[in-house]
Image (cartoon, grey):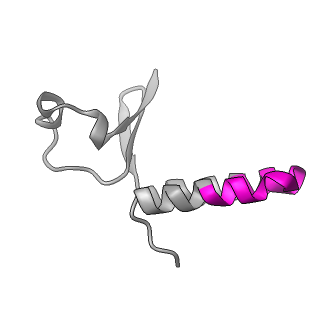
Amino acid sequence: MGGFTFWSDLDGFDQSFYEEEFIGIEVEFGSETIIVAYEIVYDYFRIAAKRYVEKRPRDRKELELYLEEMRKNLNIELR
């Protein structure tokens, strides 16, 4: 089994199992877990959006708005 956990999804009890707040998404696969930084997640969403828009150019503006909102919500600076 696998899963994704955001820090904001955890209540105080569950947060107490961590040494510190993680910035990103905790990804579980079997008994292994890693934290994937928001910047990396955002980069993959950008790649997926670019490929999607190549096939559906009329959706470009809407996807750009979603990506911008995602970037702001996750506090990601453009490089």
What is the magenta range? 49-65
Q: Residue at x 79, y 50 (%)?
A: 52
Q: Main secondary structure of the magenta part?
A: helix
Residue 23 visible in the current orientation = yes
Given the current orientation, which residue lies at the most extreme bottom position?
79
Given residues 18 and 60, the one toward you in this image is: 60
Q: Is 54 part of what is drawn in magenta?
A: yes
Q: Verify whether residue 52 appears in magenta.
A: yes
The residue lying furthest to the top in this view is: 1
Examine the rendered structure and indicate whether residue 57 appears above or below residue 78: above
Image coordinates for residue 56, horizontal then vertical, percent: 86, 50
> In the visual, does 14 lie left or right of 65?
left
Left or right side of 13 for 77: right
Identify the image quadrant of residue 6: top left
Left or right of 66 on screen, residue 54: right
At 15% from the left edge and 50% from the top edge, which residue is drawn? 20
Q: Residue at x 62, y 58 (%)?
A: 65
Q: Residue, x 46% and y 20% (percent of image)?
A: 1
In this rendering, is residue 7 above or below 42?
above
Q: Residue 13: x, y in percent? A: 12, 28
| Image quadrant where residue 23 sits | bottom left
Residue 44 visible in the displayed image:
no
Q: Position of residue 2 (x, y in %)?
A: 46, 26
Image position of 47 (left or right of 41): right
Task: Report the number of discs.
Answer: 0
